[in-house]
Image (tube, grey):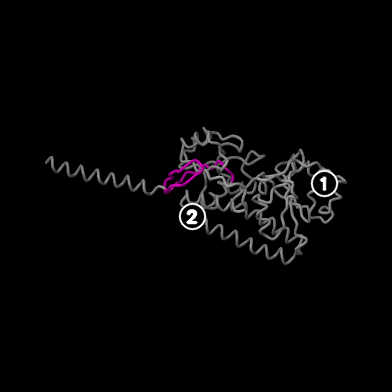
Amino acid sequence: MSFARNVYRMIFVCFGLAGGLSAYASDISINTQYGKVSVPHEVKRIVTVYEGALDSSFALGFEPVGAISTRGGDKVASYIQVTAKNVPLVGSMKEINIEAVIAQRPDVILAPWYLPKEQYALLSRIAPTIVPENKGFRPDAWINELRFYAKALNREQKAEEVIQQVNDRITLLKKEVESNLPEDERGASLIRWMPQGAVVLTPKFFSNAILAQTGFDVTDAGLVEKNRPHSSVLSLENLSTIDNDWLFMATLNSEARDALSAAQKTPVFARLSVAKKDHVIPVDGQLWTSATGPIAANGILDDIQNVIDSKLK
């Protein structure tokens, strides 16, 4: 009898070990900025503490249970508010509310590459925290991030489909730009107008990279230092240094919009050749200068399509 009990015990232990090993094997191992992290094969509760991660999660077919507010706002970015209307906030870009994250009981936390190590130490005690490796400003950064998050969420094939869809739209828009706009009239710059004045965004910036891929010749006029996202604030008198064929003018909030409106009424602004050609294009700063990801990419492509339809045809 004792022999039989031992046999049964051994079978139970073996099956238990096999089950444990199977569960372990099903985990997804991710190389992150802070080392290798294991994520459950199937996750249901995702908290995003980065706008690009929120965007990527929805594009991959998930609805996160937590997100942060956008830069300069108290909600998620305007372009994704309808999609993310049921997602609770767990902080802002400036400060993550750790208690709010805990309350959402996440299976995984998707974070930005710039997450400080101290915050990582706190978040990783709540759930596996996925931090992309920092590779600096690159035109394909959103693609790399989408693939990174997709691997953690076991949605790699879906990511490739999403990337292809965006690339197909870029190809079509590029043909329209090249068909409707001479090569020497495609110069473009992206400016974020703030209450203090204007800053010029680097051509390596997410939205600028998409703008360039659709056929525009994007430049910062040498005003942005290497590895910086934008220039110093330009005075109204120095705005002529970035005069171009096209200026995409972004604002983040009502204060910035009021400041831009006041600037546009000045003689200095009116003398800009881009203003005379009516090629100053107002764009949503939350989308063009804060967001990243495939849904944001499609929003930017929508704006470029509107430029083609209203200004070039």
Pointers 1 and 2 in contact (C-beta within 8 Å): no
Q: Residue at x 80, y 51 (%)?
A: 243
How many residues crowd mark 2 within 10 Å: few (<14), some (14–19), many (20+)? some
Q: Is residue 77 or residue 247 the one in the foreground?
A: 247
Q: Quick check: 90 left or right of 186?
A: left
Q: Which residue is mark 2?
A: 156
Q: Which residues are magenta?
A: 28-51
Please, what secondary structure does the residue beneath circle 2 have? helix
User: Magenta span has 196?
Assistant: no
- Give coordinates of residue 12: x percent, y percent: 23, 44
Q: In the image, which is nearer the foreground, mark 1 or mark 2? A: 2
- Give coordinates of residue 148: x percent, y percent: 51, 50
Q: Quick check: 215 left or right of 9?
A: right
Q: CA distance from mark 1 to mark 2?
A: 46 Å
How many residues crowd mark 1 within 10 Å: few (<14), some (14–19), many (20+)? some
Q: Is residue 288 or residue 90 the one in the foreground?
A: 288
- Give coordinates of residue 274: x percent, y percent: 81, 54
Amino acid of disc 2: Glu
**Residue that extends furthest to the front in the rendered view of this protein:** 226
Image-quadrant location for residue 67: top right
Q: Quick check: 135 left or right of 263?
A: left
**Residue that extends furthest to the right in the rendered view of this protein:** 267
For the N terminus, which image quadrant?
top left
Q: Which residue is mark 1?
A: 264
Q: Earlier in the sequence, mark 1 or mark 2?
A: 2
Q: Residue at x 49, y 57 (%)?
A: 157
Amino acid of disc 1: Gln
- 249 vs 102: above or below: below
Q: Quick check: 278 left or right of 139?
A: right
